[in-house]
Amino acid sequence: MKFLERDIVALNVEVSTPEEAIKKAGHLLSDKGYITQSYIDAMIRSFQKNGPYFVIAPNIAIPHARPEDGVKEASVSLIQLKEPVSFGSTGNDPVKLVFALGASNSDEHLNVLKMLMKVLGNAENTEKLKSAKNYEEIKSLLN
């Protein structure tokens, strides 16, 4: 499982739409071969069809799609947005942290979510992720 490793985390990323944010977070994973382009397309279609259901907490989005849409290896990337973007989620907008999640089955999906919740379950960690200036600051939250 690839979980927020250096090469799948990007800070201070500029986007102007939710779709662009999903694409950039997804490309961190597809560039490494963990997911396919079709998985990124499926994440965007899911958002367009179902709305911002994956904006799970203030400032936090976890876009994902179904495993059969193109997951090769369980993985989670992060983009920290330079300027927050509205996803249309009353109460949780604007989004500052976008975690693209790829899991190849439901067990993996639950494990990945558990790992994320360990990090995000602490409000102080979320604030640190939002203001992190380098990967080392993020890595220190994962241990």
Image: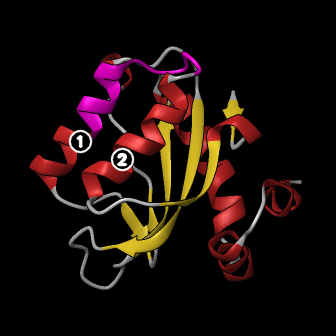
Q: Residue at x 45, y 33 (%)?
A: 27
Q: Is residue 1 above or below residue 98?
A: above
For the point 29% across and 38% down, which residue is it? Answer: 43
Q: Assess disc 1: are there few (<14), some (14-19) or many (≥20) residues with their C-alpha within 10 Å of its C-alpha.
A: many
Q: Residue at x 32, y 34 (%)?
A: 65
Task: Kindly identify which residue carries mark 1.
Answer: 44
CA–CA distance between discs 1 and 2? 7 Å
Q: Is residue 59 magenta?
A: no
Residue 70, percent from left and from top? 37, 17
Residue where numbered disc 2 is placed: 22
* Segment colored magenta: 32-43
Residue under the image location 34 percent in, 21 percent down: 37
Figure quadrant of residue 51: bottom left
Q: Position of residue 90 (x, y in %)?
A: 24, 82
Find out whether residue 34 is within the magenta segment: yes
Farthest residue in the front direction? 14
Mark number displayed over residue 129 = none
Q: Amino acid at mark 1?
A: Ile
Give the image location of residue 12, x and y in percent: 58, 63
Query: Which residue of the protein is positioned furthest toward the bottom in this rendering?
Result: 91
